[in-house]
Image (cartoon, grey):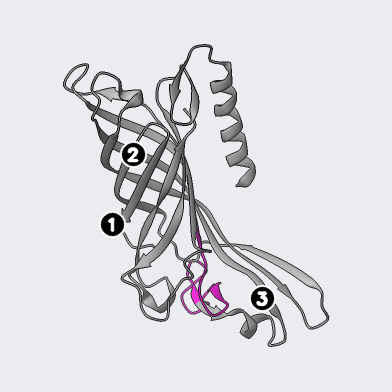
Amino acid sequence: MKRLILILIGGLITLSVSAQERTKTPIGGRPDVKGDLFLDFGFNTLNNKPDELKTRFFPSRTFNIYYQYPINLFGEGSGFTFNPGIGIGTDKMAFTEDQTLFNNPALGPESSQLLEIRDVYGDDIIVNTNNVSVNYFDIPLEFRYHFNRSNYQRSMKIAFGGKVGFLMNSHTKIAYEDENGLERKIKDRQNYGITPIRYGLTARLGFSGFNAWGYYGLNQVFQKDKGPFSTQANQINFGISVALF
């Protein structure tokens, strides 16, 4: 997954460097490439979740990379654009009290339960890393209004829309020190009952170089009766983004 993201970023940066004409944005030179390449950094949390399914705030991080292409609405200079795009969205969920997802044999292979890592790998271990990574191929769709209607690139803008995501893969990552002082790392790639398609509402506010963004998931993170505690939790993501061009 990391290799795929690096390849995508590298290809888009190469495209931007090859462009000759540049105009200024809040973060410097902008290649003459129509559209926006956003790097979203932020956090995620579960909404409508049972008390047992708590996550740690700072380790529960989100990173997205999206390219979006502008289509003018109502004629040139109206201030309105429709911005469809494509990209990759990644979420890391870190549960409290050294707990993580494991398959639930009673519900089948594509299911999960929340267990303490020490109950599985031994009471004497020291847990150093513990998270669940979920990766999506996303299709963001935004309607934007540019307050500076004569120069969209230098304008403050506000956007509302949504996105649809298709699950690419998911895995847990555990790093711990055993009773003999040996460091061990385990990455277990499973479905864990995660819903294969996600969809929700998005919002974005800012300038050409920097934006604040948010996402509210309209569907459940886990398939019905396949997640821990039969949860019906949905996801809320938010953060800031940087536009490379």
Q: Of the residues shown, which amino acid type is indicated by label 1?
A: Leu
Does the magenta portion include 93?
A: yes
Residue 204 in sight in this render: yes
Task: Assess whether mark 1 and mark 3 are in contact (beta carbons under 8 angstroms).
Answer: no
In three-dimensional space, the C-alpha distance between marks 2 and 1, rounded to whole angstroms, equals 24 Å
Q: Is residue 78 left or right of residue 142?
A: left
In three-dimensional space, the C-alpha distance between marks 3 and 2, rounded to whole angstroms, equals 39 Å
Q: Residue at x 35, y 73 (%)?
A: 49
Q: Of the residues shown, which amino acid type is indicated by label 2?
A: Gly
Earlier residue among tags 3 and 2: 3
Give the SS element for disc 3: strand
Q: Determine which quarter of the picture holds residue 103.
A: bottom right
Judge by depth and name the residue closer to the eye, 11 or 28.
Answer: 28
Residue 223 in sight in this render: no
Earlier residue among tags 3 and 1: 3
Q: Magenta segment, which residues?
A: 92-113
Number of the label disc, if any, that sits on residue 218:
1
Q: Residue at x 35, y 40 (%)?
A: 140
Q: Which residue is mark 2?
A: 206
Which one is closest to the eye, mark 3 or mark 1? 3
Judge by depth and name the residue closer to the eye, 58 or 12.
Answer: 58
Q: Which residue is mark 3?
A: 127
